[in-house]
Image: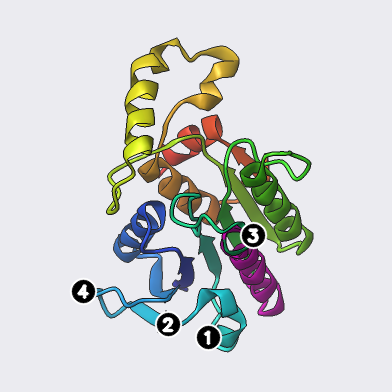
């Protein structure tokens, strides 16, 4: 039987790659997108639901699937207001996990970040850590949290400082070995492929997928 997948954050870099790969994947006959604006030129297997993701419960009836790919995330530059930032990076994934639990969706994958720690004094890391904790508390049967380091790939929007960081990291990456491997750039394609691999296998070695393991798992697709 073919599957249905939900994607949150399909307009972003990684979410867009998940969408592209699931469209091409014959194991899926329905892909549901939930977003605040319409994406054009999508095939019939993609069903689009438009609305405010900060009010995700409005989609409760349609929020049914075999898997949820939560690729939501913002930046301090795009969302300088910390209250709104937390509503996006903490609130949306948690709301999605709660709906998944209520609607008996057995598989939930969410992108977090390296350094996520609910006890951190750094707002970004603390927010991600708190999100992870609350998502895992939902006890969805198959849940994975992916913690990539700096994400590589061609984004639609310009992020000048991030591009500079990527250039620097690419230069020094050959020196990253041993414990430093986790700091290597993770291409968004690898993250997307790792998520799809996890959703279609009985991988139970880890719930938290670290950056170096994203590299490994991403090569299985």
Distance from disc 4 to disc 2, alpha carbons, whole Å, reads 15 Å
Between residue 6 and residue 217, name the one nearer to us.
6
- The outermost residue toward the left is 41
Examine the rendered structure and indicate whether residue 92 appears above or below residue 82.
below
Taking the view exactly as shown, the residue that stands out farthest to the front is 81
Q: Position of residue 30 (x, y in %)?
A: 40, 76
Within-10-Å neighbours for mark 4: few <14, some 14–19, many 20+ = few
Give yes or no for residue 220 being in the magenta stretch: no
- Label 3 or label 1, whichever lies nearer to me, is 3
Distance Cα–Cα, label 1 vs label 4: 22 Å
Asked whether the beta carbons under mark 3 and mark 4 sit within 8 Å of each other, the answer is: no
Marks 3/1: CA–CA distance: 22 Å
Please tell me how many numbered marks the rendered image carries. 4
Q: What number is the disc on residue 49? A: 2
The quadrant where residue 221 appears: top left
Q: In the image, what residue occupies the spot 39% across and 29% down?
A: 165
Front one among 163 and 209:
163
Q: Secondary structure at mark 3?
A: helix
Q: Earlier in the sequence, mark 3 or mark 4?
A: 4
Q: Which range of residues does the magenta coloring cover?
A: 85-105
Q: Are marks 2 and 1 in contact (CB under 8 Å)?
A: yes
| Disc 1: which residue | 62
Q: Is residue 83 visible?
A: yes
Q: Secondary structure at mark 4?
A: loop
- Counting residues from the start of the chain, the first of labels 1 and 4 encountered is 4
Residue displayed at 51% across by 61% down: 69
> Which residue shows up at 40% across the image and 69% down it?
28
**Residue identified by numbered label 4:** 41
């Amino acid at each position: 039987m073919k599957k249905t997948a939900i994607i949150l954050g399909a307009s972003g870099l990684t979410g867009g790659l998940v969408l592209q790969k699931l469209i091409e994947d014959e194991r899926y006959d329905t892909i549901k997108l939930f977003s605040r604006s319409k994406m054009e030129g999508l095939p019939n297997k993609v069903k689009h639901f438009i609305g405010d993701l900060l009010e995700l419960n409005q989609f409760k009836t349609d929020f049914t699937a075999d898997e949820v790919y939560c690729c939501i995330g913002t930046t301090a530059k795009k969302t300088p207001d910390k209250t709104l930032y937390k509503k996006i990076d903490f609130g949306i994934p948690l709301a999605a996990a709660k709906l998944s639990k209520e609607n008996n969706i057995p598989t939930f994958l969410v992108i977090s970040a390296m350094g996520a720690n609910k006890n951190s004094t750094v707002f970004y890391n603390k927010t991600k850590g708190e999100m992870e904790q609350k998502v895992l508390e939902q006890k969805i049967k198959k849940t994975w949290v992916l913690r990539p380091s700096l994400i590589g790939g061609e984004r639609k929007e310009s992020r000048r400082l991030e591009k500079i960081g990527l250039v620097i990291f690419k230069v020094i990456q050959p020196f990253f070995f041993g414990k430093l491997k986790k700091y290597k750039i993770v291409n968004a394609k690898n993250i997307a492929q790792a998520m799809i691999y996890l959703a279609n296998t009985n991988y139970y070695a880890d719930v938290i997928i670290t950056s170096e393991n994203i590299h490994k798992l991403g090569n299985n697709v």
